[in-house]
């Protein structure tokens, strides 16, 4: 007889609030440029004890990883909402700009993310897969509407954006990255198949 695996219990409401407060405090610290923020400072800012932080996140790296994962989660929920509110090509344009802004978030967190890059954490591979999937969804919608070319894939477009956002070290990179992204978007519409 097969024994069912025990299921993890959902967090109590107060534990859920504490976890969200910790993630929010860590995000503000890291994005604010405090790459050396100590767990004690993050816990204090969240209004909880350090022990509470460690009950939710075993290490500082685990907290950093979860902050980044939450950023990606929030980002990858956008395509559906954008398609509900806009024509497919406009949804794609807006999402491309959101990805550029996400790179700005990554720039703010780059110092703290370095420690994760040195591990075998799947967080970056997972993020790339999910972002490419979100782009594929938007590209397919645009192609079906006859407003976006059908010979570009989500992973290819993500690589192109990676090249654009690789300029993050230069002064004023975000303005320039948005301009180049607009050119990329124009290229995606050039040669679009005509809708039947």
Image (spheres, rainbow, N blue to C red):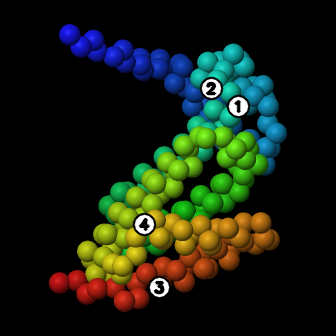
> Height in image: 99 above or below 47?
below
Label at residue 81: none
Please give the name of the residue rendered at 46% of the width and 65% of the height, measured from the top-left corner. 155
Q: Which residue is mark 4?
A: 154
Q: Nearer the viewer, residue 46 or 58?
A: 58
Indicate the position of residue 28 as horizontal and vertical percent values: 70, 43
Secondary structure found at label 4: helix
The alpha-carbon separation of the residues under discs 2 and 1 comes to 7 Å
The alpha-carbon separation of the residues under discs 2 and 3 comes to 44 Å
Q: Which residue is mark 1?
A: 60
Secondary structure found at label 3: helix
The alpha-carbon separation of the residues under discs 4 and 3 comes to 15 Å
> Height in image: 23 above or below 84?
above
The alpha-carbon separation of the residues under discs 1 and 4 comes to 32 Å
Please give the name of the residue rendered at 40% of the width and 70% of the height, measured from the top-left corner. 153
Q: Which residue is mark 2?
A: 57
């Amino acid at each position: 007889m097969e024994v069912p695996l025990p299921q993890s219990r959902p967090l109590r409401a107060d534990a859920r609030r504490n976890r969200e407060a910790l993630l929010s405090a860590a995000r503000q610290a890291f994005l604010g440029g405090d790459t050396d923020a100590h767990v004690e400072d993050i816990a204090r800012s969240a209004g909880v004890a350090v022990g509470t932080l460690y009950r939710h996140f075993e290490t500082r790296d685990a907290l950093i990883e979860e902050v980044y994962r939450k950023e990606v989660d929030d980002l990858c929920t956008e395509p559906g909402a954008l398609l509900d509110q806009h024509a497919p090509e406009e949804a794609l344009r807006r999402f491309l700009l959101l990805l550029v802004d996400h790179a700005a978030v990554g720039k703010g967190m780059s110092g703290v993310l370095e420690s994760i890059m040195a591990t075998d954490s799947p967080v970056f591979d997972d993020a790339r897969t999910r972002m490419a999937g979100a782009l594929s969804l938007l590209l397919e919608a645009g192609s079906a509407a006859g407003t976006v070319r059908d010979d570009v894939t989500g992973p290819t477009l993500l690589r192109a954006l990676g090249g654009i956002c690789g300029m993050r070290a230069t002064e004023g990179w975000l303005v320039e990255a948005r301009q180049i992204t607009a050119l990329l978007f124009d290229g995606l519409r050039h040669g679009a198949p005509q809708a039947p």
